[in-house]
């Protein structure tokens, strides 16, 4: 399997599909979610890859999807996203249209 080339801040842990993550937010409660899309690994999704734009995505427990710029040579996941657990499955289906926050 090809890796994501994305690494959690300050670690050598590579971002993988199905990872459980926490997203720290300013003045709001932390969100938990799952990495559900990585370009080059997941089947292409029109809302996350188009023209020159490539994004990876976290789907949160509240149903919202957070798209994040995918440019591993120049941009890695920010400190506010941290790995909290790893699952062994990568079987998800994203809806045709994403609910973004």
Image (cartoon, rainbow, N blue to C red):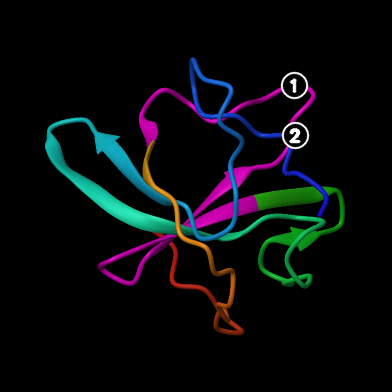
Please report the residue visible at 72 percent of the width from the left and 43 percent of the height from the top.
4
The answer to whether the residue labelled 1 contacts the one labelled 2, judged by CB atoms less than 8 Å apart, is yes
Q: Give the residue furthest to the right.
A: 51
Q: Position of residue 82 (x, y in %)?
A: 38, 34
Please report the residue visible at 52 percent of the width from the left and 73 percent of the height from the top.
98
Query: Residues under labels 1 and 2: Cα distance?
Result: 6 Å
Q: Secondary structure at mark 1?
A: loop
Q: Position of residue 74 (x, y in %)?
A: 74, 21
Q: Position of residue 75 (x, y in %)?
A: 67, 25
Q: Is residue 89 magenta?
A: no
Residue underneath mark 1: 74
Viewer-proximal residue among 53 and 81: 81
Give the numbered dot on residue 71.
Answer: 2
Residue density around tag 1, few if under 14, some if 14–19, many if 20 or more, within 10 Å: few
Viewer-proximal residue among 7 and 76: 7
Up/down of 59 relative to 20, above or below: below
Residue density around tag 2, few if under 14, some if 14–19, many if 20 or more, within 10 Å: some
Viewer-proximal residue among 39 and 54: 39
Q: Give the residue furthest to the front.
A: 88
Up/down of 87 relative to 4, above or below: below
Residue stretch in magenta: 56-82
Quick check: 64 left or right of 14? left
Quick check: 51 left or right of 78? right
Please report the residue visible at 82 percent of the width from the left and 56 percent of the height from the top.
40
Q: Secondary structure at mark 2?
A: loop
């Amino acid at each position: 399997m090809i890796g994501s080339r994305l690494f959690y801040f300050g670690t050598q842990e590579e971002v993988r599909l199905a990872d459980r993550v926490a997203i720290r937010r300013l003045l709001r409660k932390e969100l938990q979610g799952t990495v559900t899309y990585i370009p080059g690994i997941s089947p292409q999704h029109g809302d996350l890859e188009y023209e020159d734009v490539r994004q990876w995505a976290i789907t949160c427990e509240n149903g919202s999807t957070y798209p994040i710029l995918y440019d591993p040579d120049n941009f890695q996941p920010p400190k506010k996203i941290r790995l909290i657990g790893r699952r062994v499955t990568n079987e998800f289906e994203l809806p045709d249209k994403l609910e973004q926050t």
